[in-house]
């Protein structure tokens, strides 16, 4: 039994948000997308932030929100084979939940991410993503913010806007130019086939996205994941949405983006010990490979997979 399938709504905590057919009741079938608290949360919503010393160590309460977004009622679907509208709803729901949680003053950051496939940490195969609101800015984001700030102080320009300009000139790491968004593989990327999606005009927050832009973003994500799916035979992957922290102060040097990381290599002793990553594939070669896949290949791949599932 899958707790994310319609008819099993009582296997999960009550929904916080749902897109559903008119006339259907909350926590009953009839939904196309559903958001609820994680049944096994990494952080809990009730309580206040306490930081207390324990010798040289500080302890902090695990306050936060941990939500699950069920992306589709259909068990076997995932983003590349969902309708454009359904994918759009997923990215719209992220926006709605972020807006709501930003009102909670305890939170400094809201991280949206997706784990696809068991090797990438997905405990259920039914398509879903997660959102975690935290009382501190996560380390990876803090590092990106600090790096972007240093560059901005030095050059008075956004580093991400400069990267976009450079990638459009070099072209060899571009997967596809989706007009309002660019899909590219970062120079000296950490992982094989690591792919970023970024708005081409400067936006520090995901919440600055307009409704028509969400439609384009959804198409860009769907196609990019479709290319990766065909190229790597439905690989496990994670994607993370990096946006500016909740506080409104001076984050103009930051530029939101989505990082997609297929899980193809293992992080082992050298990586843990050094913080360096060995990437066996150059982004120039993998981007060229992703460009060579056409949309008909994606459709054929999905059809073959669906036929395999029926047999
Ligand atoms: Zn299911
Ligand atoms: Zn920028
Ligand atoms: Zn990032």
Image (cartoon, grey):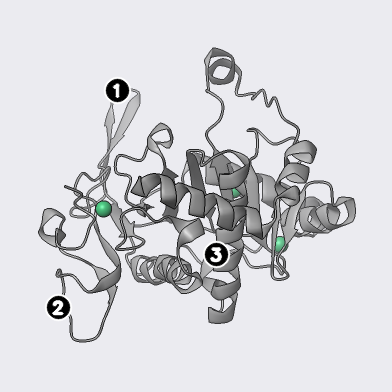
Q: Secondary structure at mark 2?
A: loop
The residue wearing badge 3 is 249
Q: Is residue 254 visible?
A: no
Question: In the rendered view, would you say 294 is above or below 283?
Answer: below
> Which of 41/224 is in front?
224
Please report whichever mark, 1 or 3, sits nearer to the chain's N-terminal start: 1
**Image vertical order of residue 71 relative to residue 142, above or below:** below
The answer to whether one can see residue 37 in this image is yes
Sequence-first tag of 2 and 1: 2
Residue furthest to the top in view is 269
Task: Tell me how far mark 3 sits from mark 2, CA to CA.
Answer: 41 Å
- Residue drawn at x 56%, y 26% as measured from the top left: 265
Q: Which quadrant of the figure shows ligand 2?
A: bottom right
Q: Quadrant of the C terminus?
A: top left
Instruction: Quickly name the residue at label 2.
Output: 25
According to the picture, the residue beneath numbered tag 1 turns out to be: 55
The residue that appears at 15% across and 61% down in the rendered structure is 9
Residue 165 is drawn in which quadrant?
bottom right
Work out whether 30 lies above or below 124: below
> Mark 3 falls on what kind of element?
loop
């Amino acid at each position: 039994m899958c707790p994310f399938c319609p008819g099993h709504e009582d296997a999960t905590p009550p929904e916080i948000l749902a897109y559903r057919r008119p006339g259907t009741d909350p926590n009953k079938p009839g939904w196309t997308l559903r958001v609820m608290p994680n049944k096994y949360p990494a952080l809990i919503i009730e309580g206040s932030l306490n930081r207390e010393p324990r010798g040289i160590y500080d302890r902090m309460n695990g306050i936060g929100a941990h939500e699950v977004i069920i992306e589709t009622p259909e068990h076997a679907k995932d983003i590349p084979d969902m309708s454009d509208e359904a994918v759009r709803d997923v990215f719209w729901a992220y926006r709605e939940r972020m807006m709501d949680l930003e009102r909670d003053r305890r939170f400094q950051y809201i991280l949206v991410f997706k784990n696809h496939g068991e090797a990438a940490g997905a405990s259920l195969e039914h398509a879903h993503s997660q959102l975690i609101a935290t009382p501190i800015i996560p380390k990876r984001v803090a590092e990106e913010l600090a790096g972007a700030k240093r560059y901005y102080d030095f050059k008075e320009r956004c580093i991400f806007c400069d990267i976009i300009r450079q990638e459009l000139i070099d072209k060899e790491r571009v997967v596809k130019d989706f007009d309002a968004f660019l899909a590219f593989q970062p120079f000296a990327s950490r992982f094989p086939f690591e792919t970023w999606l970024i708005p081409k005009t400067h936006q520090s927050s995901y919440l600055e996205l307009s409704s028509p832009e969400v439609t384009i973003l959804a198409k860009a994500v769907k196609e990019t994941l479709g290319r990766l799916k065909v190229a790597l035979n439905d690989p496990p992957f994670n994607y993370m949405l990096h946006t500016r922290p909740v506080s409104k102060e001076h984050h103009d040097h930051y530029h939101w983006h989505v990082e997609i990381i297929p899980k193809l290599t293992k992080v082992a002793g050298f990586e843990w010990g050094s913080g360096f990553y060995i990437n066996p594939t150059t982004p120039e070669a993998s981007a060229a490979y992703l460009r060579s896949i056409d949309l008909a290949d994606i459709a054929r791949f999905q059809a073959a997979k669906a036929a395999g599932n029926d047999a």
